[in-house]
Image: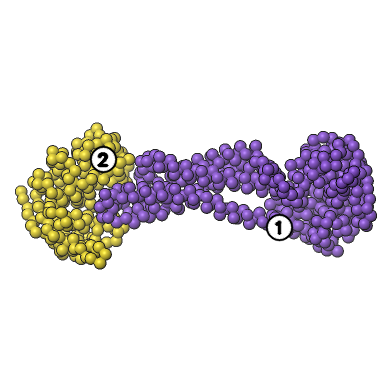
């Protein structure tokens, strides 16, 4: 059974009386452990597609199944629960909570699903922070961290709850090429070690080279879908 | 939920100035409400006390006709006991009722003192000196001389009245009055005491004389104009009414007496009841006004943190949890502001409960004789007031915060994340 299945997914936005189609019928299957990049020009529907996969929005038409469960017709509350337990997000602008330390930002995500004792939570958070290379920086707030470090915190936050799938919308767009490569290498490491499925959108060819599947989106449709290595 | 509460607390440190302004706005509102409630309580306590001491007791027994002629100080409708047997036996029977602590007899009559070119009007109160002192503590207000004693032909006058008639303690005064039979008479009394009261009515118009002397000069043996019943708690005075009514239905064949409860049958007291209800609305209104500052702050916070709300939504926070987070942020401001306001309002109320607020200037030109209004009011400090205002503040602020918090909770994650 595929981890993710999209069948004829369409999304139309309404701007007043005008209908703007963002996705025109996407058929896509993603298996567990794939490291997939979605690329394409601006306005091709990358973010919309990630939003559909991430249960942040529902399609106008079509069907989405996550782990065999249909998620395309769920209520907002049900979608929130699907996101909470199954999906990790990494954003271009990191979106860390500024008043929380690196440790607390990661802890915030796991507290939503894990009601274990303090000590067990602490162990998990410190372990993931160490794995993304932030050992010793746990008590720093976002404004005391570099862009690369902040994005590592965001990666740790997405991974700490061990989601089935991690979605990253242009996660390296705000980073220099070396830092971007470092962050992607961490994602690859996690993909290999934990078997977490990654889907990310990017424009950056230097980052794209690390993926093993490439989906090219054009005008809301998949124009090419290639697997490598 | 615990971590959301912890996050709500931390979020308040994002803009300390903004948080402080909101806290101060709430605190000022609570100070105003604590002080206003303390002051209103003070005014009411003072007014009710004067009303009970000098007008109504806890229950007043009068002749039904006297109620209509009271302003004229009529002596034709008196309390002369059950079936005319005299008021002292009546007092004994009333005192046997459980819950009646004291029965105060008073014989009030109009009088004048003639000066060289003027007549000074006044009101004589025939009293039982021992009972009256025990009830109103009038003996504690004596600033010169002594309390009147039964059996002596003597009077005690208010300081203002003595000034008006130009007499001093130790001197004699001839008082003119009309008996119930219409005879205009005069009697000379020794002035043995001078008391001071900030109650204009008592200080400027009343003189006390022993009950026996009053009845003698007015030719009214065994008669008084009213009996005031005192119970352990004036708010529970009504509890003795059933036994009292039974007694009167058995003993009072004439059916001429009426029983007036201190807070019924008096227009001004009923007016105060309405005023208290209106004041309660005003207290809520004051806090609601302060809430506008907080609601405005929270709306700004929601606008500033739209992307963050989107992120939290993406992490799986439900709308209800986002609502809780923002409501808690407001509630913490409400708790802080209300606590500071309650403490500072309490301090202010405590200070003015000692020093008082002097309304003399405001009362100038107003005849307060009739209304038993004191020119100085003391606020009432009570923990109940502080707890009530604190709770009111927290509840209203928290409810007000739901408006911006709902705005945050209703944001669609995709739209929130798009926000720059």
Residue at the limit of the structure toward the left, as seen here: A229
Q: Can marks 1 and 2 be said to lie on one chain?
A: no
Q: What is the x, y in percent for residue B170?
A: 89, 35
Q: Are marks 1 and 2 in contact (CB under 8 Å)?
A: no
The chain ID associated with circle 1 is: B
What residue sits 65% from the left and 39% below the top?
Answer: B356
Secondary structure state at the residue bearing disc 2: helix
Where is residue A58 shown, x and y percent of the image? 24, 61
Chain letter of the residue carrying label 2: A
Which mark is drawn over residue A125?
2
Q: Is residue B194 left or right of residue A1?
A: right
- Residue B267: give its label: 1
> Which residue corresponds to the image point at 92% horizontal and 51% vertical from the top-left?
B218
**Element type at mark 1:** helix
Instruction: Place residue B207 in its image quadrant.
Output: top right
Left-right relation of B349 to A118: right
Q: Is residue A11 visible?
A: yes
Residue B348 x, y percent position in the rendering: 58, 39
In the image, farthest residue toward the top: A136
Q: Nearer the viewer, residue B132 or B378?
A: B378
In the figure, A101 relative to B118: above or below? above
Give the class, few, some or many, for how many residues have Cα within 10 Å of label 1's Cα (few <14, many ≥20).
few
A95 or B312, which lies in front? Answer: A95
Residue A216, by quadrant, is: bottom left
Q: Residue furthest front?
A: B117
The chain whose colour is yellow is A
């Amino acid at each position: 059974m595929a981890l993710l299945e999209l069948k004829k997914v369409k999304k139309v936005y309404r701007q007043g009386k005008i209908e703007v189609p963002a996705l025109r019928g996407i058929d896509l299957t993603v298996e567990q452990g794939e490291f997939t990049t979605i690329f394409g020009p601006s306005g091709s529907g990358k973010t919309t597609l990630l939003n559909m996969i991430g249960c942040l929005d529902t399609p106008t038409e079509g069907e989405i199944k996550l782990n065999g469960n249909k998620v395309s017709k769920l209520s907002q509350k049900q979608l929130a629960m699907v996101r909470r337990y199954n999906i990790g997000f990494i954003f271009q602008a990191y979106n860390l909570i500024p008043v929380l330390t690196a440790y607390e930002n990661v802890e915030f995500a796991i507290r939503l699903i894990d009601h274990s004792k303090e000590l067990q939570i602490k162990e998990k958070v410190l372990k993931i922070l160490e794995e993304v290379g932030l050992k010793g920086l746990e008590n720093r707030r976002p404004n005391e961290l570099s862009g690369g470090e902040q994005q590592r915190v965001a990666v740790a936050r997405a991974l700490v709850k061990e989601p089935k799938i991690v979605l990253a919308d242009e996660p390296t767009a705000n980073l220099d090429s070396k830092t971007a490569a470092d962050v992607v290498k961490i994602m690859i490491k996690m993909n290999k070690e934990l078997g977490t499925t990654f889907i990310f959108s990017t424009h950056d060819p230097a980052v794209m080279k690390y993926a093993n599947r490439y989906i090219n989106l054009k005008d809301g449709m998949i124009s090419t879908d290639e697997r490598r290595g | 939920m615990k971590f959301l509460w912890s996050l709500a607390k931390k979020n308040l440190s994002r803009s300390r100035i903004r948080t402080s302004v909101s806290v101060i706005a709430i605190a000022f509102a609570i100070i105003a409400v604590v002080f206003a409630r303390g002051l209103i309580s003070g005014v009411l306590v003072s007014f009710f006390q004067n009303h009970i001491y000098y007008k109504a007791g806890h229950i007043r027994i009068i002749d039904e006709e006297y109620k209509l002629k009271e302003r004229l100080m009529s002596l034709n409708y008196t309390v002369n006991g059950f079936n005319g047997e005299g008021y002292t036996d009546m007092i004994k029977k009333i005192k046997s009722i459980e819950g009646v602590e004291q029965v105060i007899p008073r014989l009030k009559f109009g009088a004048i003192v003639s000066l060289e070119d003027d007549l000074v009007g006044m009101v004589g109160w025939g009293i039982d000196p021992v009972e009256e002192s025990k009830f109103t503590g009038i003996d504690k207000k004596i600033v010169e001389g002594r309390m009147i004693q039964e059996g002596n032909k003597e009077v005690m006058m208010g300081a203002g009245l003595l000034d008006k008639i130009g007499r001093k303690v130790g001197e004699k005064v001839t008082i003119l009055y009309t008996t119930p039979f219409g005879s205009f008479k005069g009697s000379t009394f020794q002035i043995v005491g001078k008391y001071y009261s900030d109650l204009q009515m008592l200080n400027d118009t009343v003189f006390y004389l022993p009950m026996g002397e009053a009845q003698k000069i007015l030719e009214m043996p065994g008669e008084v104009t009213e009996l005031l019943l005192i119970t352990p708690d004036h708010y529970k005075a009504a509890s003795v009414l059933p036994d009292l009514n039974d007694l009167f239905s058995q003993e009072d064949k004439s059916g001429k007496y009426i029983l007036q409860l201190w807070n019924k049958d008096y227009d001004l007291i009923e007016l105060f009841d309405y005023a208290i209800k209106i004041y309660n609305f005003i207290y809520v209104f004051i806090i609601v006004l302060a809430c506008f500052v907080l609601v405005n702050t929270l709306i700004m916070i929601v606008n500033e943190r739209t992307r963050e709300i989107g992120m939290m939504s993406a992490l799986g926070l439900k709308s209800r949890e986002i609502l809780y987070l923002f409501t808690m942020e407001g509630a913490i401001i409400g708790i802080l502001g209300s606590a500071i306001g309650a403490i500072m309002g309490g301090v202010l109320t405590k200070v003015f409960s000692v020093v008082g607020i002097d309304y003399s200037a405001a009362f100038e030109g107003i005849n307060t004789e009739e209304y038993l209004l004191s020119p100085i009011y003391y606020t009432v400090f009570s923990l109940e007031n502080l707890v009530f205002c604190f709770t009111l503040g927290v509840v209203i602020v928290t409810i007000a915060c739901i408006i911006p918090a709902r705005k945050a909770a209703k944001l669609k994650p995709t739209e929130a994340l798009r926000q720059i």
